[in-house]
């Protein structure tokens, strides 16, 4: 009988399959449960696990040299910032190349997980089967449970409201051609969708609204991929120094976002996620996208903003992020209230020596 622990992995997305490969290399027995019919998680377009938030025009905003696994480089034929189809293909090829597809149970959602008295984990799947494992690794992702502003804005909006999770293209899930659209949010999805909709012949007006400002960085700065330049910082560079250098570089190479009508960030560079977009500031500068502060209230098809301005709007797209959820755990056992889940090295819950998130 093997003395090695048995490991359960929930999710065969980018993190889940990397864990599978590492365990296979060490000869540790493992099994992976995936709700969909293929690996890749969020990068599988129209994933039948119903959790993918991929839109048709999506490209990675991380350079391929930074995104690839060290032991399996992306092909030279891939663009510097590949589209979602190439990324999905890459993950499928990774699993096939290292030969652990037979360790993944596809179309097998985990419905409940319990920590037993003997320290093992009982795993119940949708088909009613139950198994026990010594170690549990959770890789279920967090870009699937839509987050909406709470409380909602006062009043009633009579147009259409969707979350960016549902957005596929200007024709799906709703028709956006010729429409007046508000994009609410300052994250990467908000930038991508706003830039796509403002192109000639698509939406008649595009407004970009947000409750706070953000630092916007391009894919390329001074002709070089910015995320590759960032690796030039020594590992132990103090935050204050790194932040100061980034602020100077952005001011020199990009400019201040408030000069384009956006709100001034209320934090230092690096204190929150950067927003990545090569095109958004150009589109704002051309007037293709109209900047607005946060929404204040609704009145029929009219949207009032906190600066007192008001616009007639047909569609609002909430790009307001996601809630971190673990639907297979009892909420009183483990949850991330307000997306807060303290973890050692962002993956270990110290009270459980055999649980990794």
Image (spheres, helix red, strand yellow):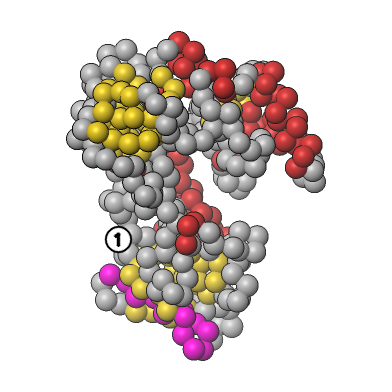
Q: Describe residue 351's horizontal placement relative to residue 249 as left or right.
A: left
Between 251 and 10, the one nearer to me in the picture = 251
Q: Is residue 63 visible?
A: no
User: At 42% across and 49% down in the image, what residue appears?
Assistant: 322
Between 38 and 321, the one nearer to me in the picture = 321
| Residue 180 falls in image quadrant | top left
Q: Whole-percent x and y of residue 67?
A: 56, 40
User: At 69% across and 34% down in the image, what residue appears?
Assistant: 230
**Magenta span:** 115-126
Q: Whole-percent x and y of residue 103?
A: 42, 64
Q: Describe residue 172's horizontal placement relative to residue 187 as left or right.
A: left
User: At 33% across and 59% down in the image, what residue appears?
Assistant: 35
Q: Is residue 125 magenta?
A: yes
Relative vertical location of residue 69 with respect to residue 205 in this rendering, above or below: below
Between 279 and 24, the one nearer to me in the picture = 279
- The quadrant of the picture occupied by the N terminus is bottom right
| Residue 28 falls in image quadrant | bottom right
Relative vertical location of residue 43 with respect to residue 254 in this rendering, above or below: below
Q: Describe residue 229's horizontal placement relative to residue 174 as left or right.
A: right
Q: Whole-percent x and y of residue 343?
A: 60, 63
Q: Label 1 belongs to which residue?
A: 107
Q: Residue furthest bottom?
A: 118
Q: Residue furthest front?
A: 308
Q: Whole-percent x and y of residue 82?
A: 47, 31
Q: Is residue 17 magenta?
A: no
Q: Residue furthest top?
A: 286
Q: Residues within 10 Å of mark 1 (few under 14, many from 20)?
A: some
């Amino acid at each position: 009988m093997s003395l090695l622990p048995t490991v359960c992995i929930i999710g065969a997305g980018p993190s889940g399959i990397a864990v599978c490969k590492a365990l296979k290399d060490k000869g540790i027995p493992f099994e992976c449960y995936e709700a969909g019919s293929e690996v890749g998680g969020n990068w599988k377009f129209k994933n039948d696990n119903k959790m993918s938030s991929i839109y048709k025009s999506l490209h990675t905003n991380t350079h391929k040299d930074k995104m690839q696994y060290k032991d399996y480089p992306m092909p030279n034929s891939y663009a510097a910032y590949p589209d979602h189809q190439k990324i999905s293909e890459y993950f499928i090829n990774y699993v096939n190349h290292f030969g652990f597809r037979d360790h993944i149970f596809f179309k097998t959602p985990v419905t409940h997980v319990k920590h037993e008295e003997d320290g093992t984990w009982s795993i119940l799947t949708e088909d009613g089967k139950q198994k026990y494992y010594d170690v549990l690794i959770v890789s279920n992702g967090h870009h699937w449970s839509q987050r909406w502003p709470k409380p909602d804005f006062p009043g009633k909006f009579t147009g259409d409201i969707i979350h960016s999770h549902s957005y596929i293209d200007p024709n799906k899930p709703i028709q956006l051609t010729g429409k007046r659209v508000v994009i609410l949010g300052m994250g990467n999805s908000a930038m991508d969708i706003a830039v796509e909709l403002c192109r000639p012949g698509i939406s008649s007006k595009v407004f970009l609204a947000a409750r706070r400002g953000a630092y916007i960085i391009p894919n390329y700065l001074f002709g070089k991929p910015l995320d590759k330049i960032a690796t030039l910082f020594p590992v132990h560079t103090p935050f204050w120094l790194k932040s100061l250098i980034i602020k100077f570089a952005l001011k020199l190479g990009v400019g201040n976002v408030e000069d384009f009508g956006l709100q001034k960030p209320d934090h230092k560079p690096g204190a929150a996620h950067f927003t990545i977009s090569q095109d958004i500031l150009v589109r704002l500068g051309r007037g293709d996208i109209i900047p607005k502060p946060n929404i204040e209230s609704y009145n029929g098809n009219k949207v009032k903003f906190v600066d007192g301005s008001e616009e007639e709007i047909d569609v609002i797209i909430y790009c307001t992020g996601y809630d971190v959820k673990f639907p297979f755990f009892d909420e009183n056992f483990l949850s991330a209230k307000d997306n807060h889940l303290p973890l050692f090295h962002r993956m270990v819950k110290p009270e459980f020596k055999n649980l990794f998130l």
